[in-house]
Amino acid sequence: MTARRPDGADGRAAGAPVSRRAGLATAAAALLTGATATAASAAGPRPGSPARPGAGPRGAPRTGPAARPGAGPRGRLQRDVDAVLAAGATGVLAEVQTAGGRTTARAGRADLSDPRGPVPWDAYYRIGSDTKTFTAVLALQLVGEGRLALTDTVERWLPGAVRGNGNDGRRITVANLLRQTSGLNDYLAVSPDAADAFTPDGYRRSRFRTTSPEEQLRAALTRPPLWLPEADHPERERRWGYSNTNYVLAGLVVERATGNPWAQELHDRIIGPLGLRHTFTPGASPYVPAPTAAAYTWFPDCDRPTDTTLASGGGADGSVISTTHDHGVFLRALMAGRLLRPAQLAAMKETVAAEGWSAAPGVRYGLGIAWRPVAGSRGGIWFHGGTHLGVVSESGVVPDGSRAVASAAFTLRMGDPAQDAQDAAGLRLVDRALTGR
């Protein structure tokens, strides 16, 4: 595949854009409205899960804190993982993949109560909003099969579902959902109980609660939209605003178009064919299987972190649990054309400006995946990323899929400038891993 700069006209969202960090800092509110929050536990997966606790990819070269970082890819990755740890994470894990193999590195502790326990190799973790790329692939596969069209409106597939307070599903297409140009409010940001959820006690009261996608959608529709896409050609809308509600709806459209649950389509179309034995959807379970690391959240105005390793809920907008290895396999397969036909992969790469969403400059958002320029990479990189209670997922892949990186940092600071330093170190890790610089 020829590397190219993504297409798409520039556009700015009406009102302040929701950044990936600021927007997902409201993840505490999600615990009361059914959104995904990061969970990590030694408990096993729910019955029927394709994951096997403790079973990770074998036979790959590894580096770790006991290894002396030297020259070459292993030493460079270890230094970058150590930098994320030094910026404030309790534990970090990363993997770089190429056709020639993989290089991994880790740093920090799996649990603050155990000073000797390192972050496990091949640890499971919630990838958060990286789930959106998976959901976009499902929708685009249906487009390639002629069962769905990017110009189809939400009203066509979900009659009457998006109405009230000026919201109008007749003015929102599948393309608007996947590209985040619908103007719909993020259901995480409009919860009436957000203030309580931003506390350790609020988290503990809410960690086992779940709500349905329909309830999440109703919450979003209690507010007028930020804008309505143009009436004649709504799919051409270029105003952009990140909203988890878009992917709640995308999951419902996939279910209506196929007659199957979103999780079933995810398994049958992506997880199974790619052999992602350590990737699954947890349903209502608040647990992540072993091996994993505890996920720590610093809530606002708290002088110590809270162990936020239990939380339930989520779906097509952010519920997938995976490993750095499986996530890298998925990204490489996507960009190499193994999951989408050429026309649909090209459509995925048609982008709009996504200013304010990430600390990195020049970010543009396509259909469930984003692009940004990186020094030393002529074609830039493709990525998404996810943040939930206690974990930050950073990843990226080069345009032809020949090289990918995935990482997890098991600490999140809400409303703390120190999180910016950790995020910056995570972005540097991705950039250096993909450019070799």
Image (spheres, grey):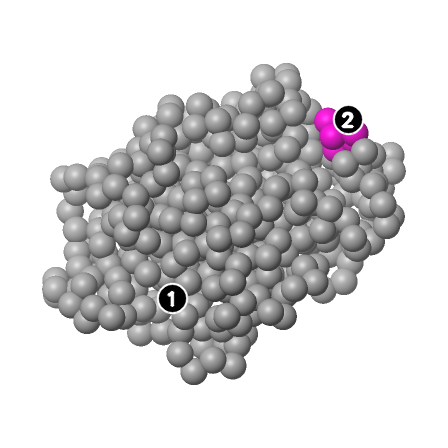
How far across and down, in percent of the image, does residue 219 sit?
71, 51
Q: Residue furthest top?
A: 146
Please tell me whether mark 2 sits on a helix, a strand or a loop: helix
- Residue 361 seen: no
Crowdedness near tag 2: few (<14), some (14–19) or many (≥20) residues, C-alpha within 10 Å: few
Residue at image location 81% in from the left, 33% down from the top: 160
Please tell me whether mark 1 sits on a helix, a strand or a loop: strand
Crowdedness near tag 1: few (<14), some (14–19) or many (≥20) residues, C-alpha within 10 Å: many
Give the numbered dot on residue 307.
1
Q: Which residues are magenta?
A: 153-159
Which residue position holds label 2? 156
Residue at image location 32% in from the left, 53% down from the top: 41
Depth check: give the residue in front, 330 or 376.
Answer: 330
Above or below: residue 347 compared with residue 322: above
Depth check: give the residue in front, 371 or 290.
Answer: 290
How far across and down, in percent of the image, does residue 158 sit?
74, 30
- Left or right: residue 295 versus residue 179 is left
How far across and down, in percent of the image, does residue 278 sit?
32, 38
The amino acid at mark 1 is Asp
Is mark 1 in CB contact (under 8 Å) with mark 2? no
